[in-house]
Image (cartoon, rainbow, N blue to C red):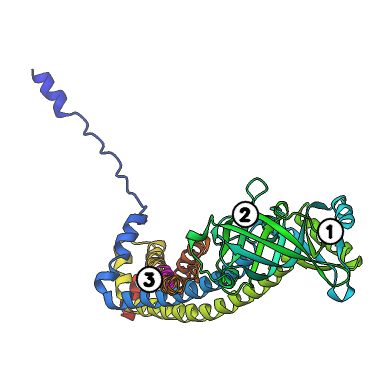
Amino acid sequence: MEKNIEDEKYEMPKVPQKLEIKTDHSLSAWDLLKLSLRVFRTKPTRTILTILGMSVGIGTVVFLVSLGYGLQYILIGNLITSEDSLMTLEAAYPSESGKGIDLEKVAEIKTREEVDAVSPVTEFSGELSIAEGAPGIIPVTRVVRASYFKFAGVYPDLGEVFDEDNPGVVLSAQALKLLGLTVDETIIGKEVTGKVYYPKPDGSTEEVLISKLQIRGIITDENESPLAYVPYSSVTKEPTVLKSLLIKARNVDLVEPLRDKLEKEGFLISAKVDLVNQARKITNAITTVLMVFGTAALIVSAIGMFNTMIVGFLERIYEVGVMKSLGATDSDVQNLFLMESFIIGFLGGVSGVAIGMGGGALINFVMSTLSQNMGSKALTLFITPAWFAIATLVLSSCIGLISGYWPSRNASKLSPREAFVRK
């Protein structure tokens, strides 16, 4: 027993384990976010006004650019009603030439390698009556094939176009007025009878009857001239001399070569692709000008935000010293300022996009309501593409980071001693 006690008495003490000190004091993203949100408690008025200033700049950009896209949609959308119409040329001889397009020329054009399809167009004066009502003279009565509507990009606002299996008549609103009727959906399906007058070489006219048809569609545009579209199959004698041809190219790349060939043959050519290209140049110029005005407002807002970040840095020099005394690294201090500026920029972008799109939506609603009350279609004047809204949020966030870079860099370089002295 004594031996055991002696052994325990002279037993060597245990060596303590080496103390491990962790030197990584970097703040996590969550910590930086929580510290950055303090500005809403410590300086709520200044922070909200800075975000509001960014919102006004971003909102102005979104509002003006949306107007540019809306104008582009209205202008080009009215020109391109179908993909086929974009690849279609309208060919006609000059009126002073006195020449008409005969069926042999149509057959020859159809065989060309650049041509996909041809739709003949004739135009005469006609006399129509609806449901045994009083007849009326329609100055422009076009005898066309069903493919005309697809190639010309013309579609009725009420009803539908006719086809080979279901022939019918498509009338404009002005043509209905000449017949003593007003635009109404109940007119769709009513029977139409009449005749067209083919001109003869001696200057007289030949009366050609139109078989009994039903009204299939109505073009409600009040600016459209009085006209009627009737199918080839409805006239008792097909016309042999044509006013013009709608010639569809096999693809868009062949439109230019085909037009050059037809112009050399004496045709006057009208192509929607030319109108679309001109319209795009005009609308792009308008959008660019609007974007310049919006960018000017955005720059003013960015300068205001930069000023706010500098003032915030000068007011928090002592706080930076305290943070570094407690072990905050240079990157912690820099990231804290950058996080604050990023949050302000991002929130300014979100509220700015909401203001810009909301203002556009409000004007769209008012304009559409007024347009529909006047008997026209709904009008969409402001359009904001999704990609542009996302790009605007990215831009506003980048502006926030850029505005906060210089103050954050200066704050990270401060030593605790310098911070306390400058305070």
Mark 2 belongs to which amino acid? Leu
Determine which of the numbered discs, if any, sits on residue 213 in the image: 2
Q: Of residues 344 and 290, which is closer to you in this image? A: 290
Q: CA distance from mark 3 to mark 2?
A: 92 Å
Residue highlighted by disc 3: 415
As measured in the structure, the alpha-carbon distance from the residue carrying label 1 to the one carrying label 3 is 95 Å
Q: Are marks 3 and 2 in contact (CB under 8 Å)?
A: no
Disc number for residue 364? none
Stretch of the chain drawn in magenta:
353-362
Regarding residue 309, the answer to whether it shows in the image is: yes
Looking at marks 1 and 3 on the same chain, the residue that comes earlier in the sequence is marked by 1
Q: Callout 2: helix, strand or loop?
A: strand
The amino acid on which the numbered mark 3 sits, given as a three-letter code, is Ser
Between label 1 and label 3, give the one nearer the viewer. 1
Q: Answer whether labels 1 and 3 touch (C-beta < 8 Å).
A: no
Q: Is residue 300 left or right of residue 34?
A: right
Quadrant housing residue 313: bottom left
Total labels: the figure holds 3
Q: Which residue reaches farthest left? A: 1
Identify residue for label 1. Answer: 240
Query: Local crowd at mark 3 within 10 Å, few (<14), some, or many (≥20)?
Result: some
Q: Which is more N-terminal, label 2 or label 1?
A: 2
Classify mark 1: helix, strand or loop.
loop
Residue in view at x 70 percent, y 62 percent = 195
Residue 147 in picture, x, y percent from top left: 70, 53
- Seen at 44% across and 79% down, the residue is 301
